[in-house]
Image: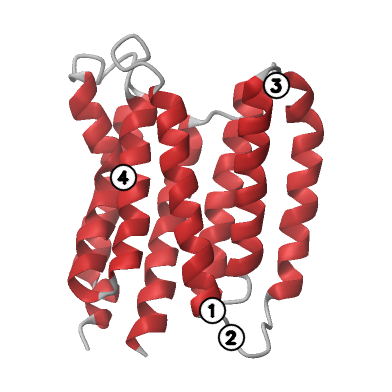
Amino acid sequence: MRFPWLLTPQATVIFFVLVVIAVFTQLTRTTTSRSIPFWLRALLKSAPALFLTWLSWSVGPPLVALLFLFCSIGDILLDLPEDKVRHGFQLGAVSFAAALVCVCILSYENALPRMPLLSLSLTNVVIAIFVLRWVLPKIHGPGRIFELTYFVLLILSNILASTSNTAVFLGSSLWFMSDLSIGLSKYVSGEPVSSLDTLGLYDLGLYFLAIGFLYAFAF
C-alpha cells in the first residue's frame, strides 16, 4: 500500500507550502508579486492541484488524477488576464465543471451502504439556495444559465459526496463554500468576501478529496 504516503509529514508539508505560496502570490498580485509574469503566477496558483494530480496518478486510479488535472487547468485559465487569453474565465469554469463531474462519478462509485452523511448535505443545499437568492438577480444574459448550471452541478456533487466517506464530504464542502464565496464577491456589490481569500479553503478541500478518494480505492 502506497496510500499512507499522502499522510506523511513530508507530503503534507510540501502541499501546504505550495498552498501558502499560491495564496501569497494571489493576495499580493498588485503589490509584492506584481512583477511575476502572469503565466508563472498562474502556475504557482495551480501548484497544489498539480501536486495532487501527480500524487494521485502515482498511487491511485486515473479518474482521481483527472479530477485534479481539471482543477489545475481551471486554476491556470481563471488566473490568465482576459486581454491575453479570450474567454479564459469561461473555459476555466468549464474545466472546474468537468472536475465536479469527476467528483460525482467517484462519489457514486464509493458510496457507503447506509450513506450516514447524506442528511448533512441538506445544510449545504439550504446555504446554496440562500446565496443564489442574492446572486442570480445580478446575472443577466447567457451567463445566467451558465452560472446556474455550474451551481446546480456544485450542489449535486456535494450531495453525492455526502454518500461517500467523511474526508470526501469535507473536501467537497470546503470547495463548495469557496465557490459560493466567489459568487458572492463577484456579483454582490459591497460584499466583503474576496475570491482570493477563498483559495486556501479550496486547496484544503482538494487535499481532503485526495485523502478520501485514495483511501477508498486503497482499502
Measure the alpha-carbon separation of dots 4 and 1: 24 Å
- Confirm or deny contact between disc 4 and disc 3 (CB under 8 A): no
Mark 2 is surrounded, within 10 Å at the Cα level, by few (under 14), some (14 to 19) or many (20 or more) other residues, namely some
Question: At which x and y percent is residue 141?
Answer: 68, 17
Question: At which x and y percent is residue 36?
Answer: 18, 20
Mark 4 is surrounded, within 10 Å at the Cα level, by few (under 14), some (14 to 19) or many (20 or more) other residues, namely many
Q: Quick check: 128 above or below 51?
A: above
Q: Quick check: 196 above or below 48?
A: above
Measure the alpha-carbon separation of dots 2 and 1: 7 Å
User: Three-letter amino acid code at disc 2?
Assistant: Leu
Quarter holding residue 166:
bottom right
- Determine the residue positioned at 50% across, 54% down: 100
* Residue occupied by mark 3: 139
The tag on residue 165 is 1
Question: At which x and y percent is residue 40?
Answer: 18, 28
* Residue occupied by mark 2: 112
* Residue occupied by mark 4: 72
Per the image, label 3 sits on a secondary structure element best described as loop
